Image: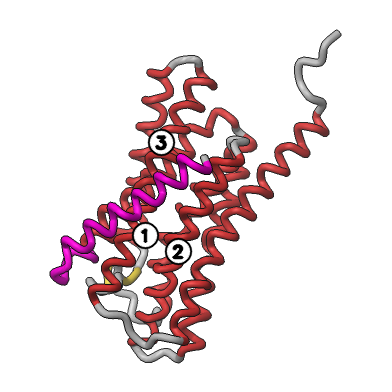
Amino acid sequence: MPVLFPPPTVRYHRRMDVIWSGFLGSLAAGMMTAVGAVGVFFFRSLSERLEDGLLSFAAGIMLAACFFSLLLPAINFGEIEFGSKIIAVWLVIAGFLSGGFCLYLMHRYLPHEHFHAGHEGPDVTAIRRIWLFVFAITLHNFPEGMAVGSGFAGGDLHNGMTLATGIGIQNIPEGLAVAIALIAVGYSRMQSFLVGALTGLAEPVGGLFGAVAVSLAGPVMPFALAFSAGAMLLIISDEIIPETHRRGFESLATFSLMIGFACMMFLDATLG
């Protein structure tokens, strides 16, 4: 009699392989923040034009990842899981809006600091300035890591690798910008590098969370991918784009975003 389902031990090992893939993929992407932060030993400051261009490039990669590596696969997974495209799309919409709203609440109630706009959230004077930056980057990196972990959790290694590669590339300019911002307010090069590098550790935490959640509950997959996309899109629209359009380099920022989008689209088409 044919075996319709693999035995529990096989399913367990497959699940653990997926979880480890999600964790290691998001860890590799997070470590690219440290690669970017190394630049603080070579540069003491970035021009406003270059900084806006780099951050916009990173935003373009994130934007493309939302569509090609998260939302479209989420709809496909949902249609396979539930046998209905309508149900899949509604579930993805629910996850997408939930992700954006949850990150909005975090932005509203957790104290953090933007690169140029300054302090946002409750006025917590006891928290040192450096931790406000850490909070801000954690808000960025956790949903990115969760996206990578969820991407691997679908069992699609190519999709997970594409996400990890794209997020890793966009972490390089982000890590450099963070380290430069810290050295500009009085921290040493080593302190700036270490803090910039350590902020990337939020990504494997998010990756592990996403991989475990999806692996233990397959039907959650479409919602989880869309949730990550919603959180990332809120970061792009609510924070990065306004930050890069406030100093007179709007055209540069726009075209940098488009180039980043095109790079991620290329990666998804060739690796995904």
Is 161 a magenta residue? no
Q: Nearer the viewer, mark 3 or mark 1?
A: 1
Residue 29: x and y, percent? 54, 59
Callout 3, which amino acid?
A: Leu
Q: Give the CA distance from mark 1 to mark 2.
A: 7 Å
Q: Disc 3 on helix, strand or loop?
A: helix
Disc 1: which residue: 58
Disc 2: which residue: 171
Which comes before the other along the chain, label 2 or label 3? 3
Callout 2, which amino acid?
A: Asn
Question: Would you say 132 lies left or right of 242 here?
Answer: right
Disc 3: which residue: 71
Disc sitting over residue 242 in the figure = none
Q: Disc 1 on helix, strand or loop?
A: helix
In which image quadrant can residue 91 be found? top left
Q: Give the CA distance from mark 2 to mark 3.
A: 21 Å
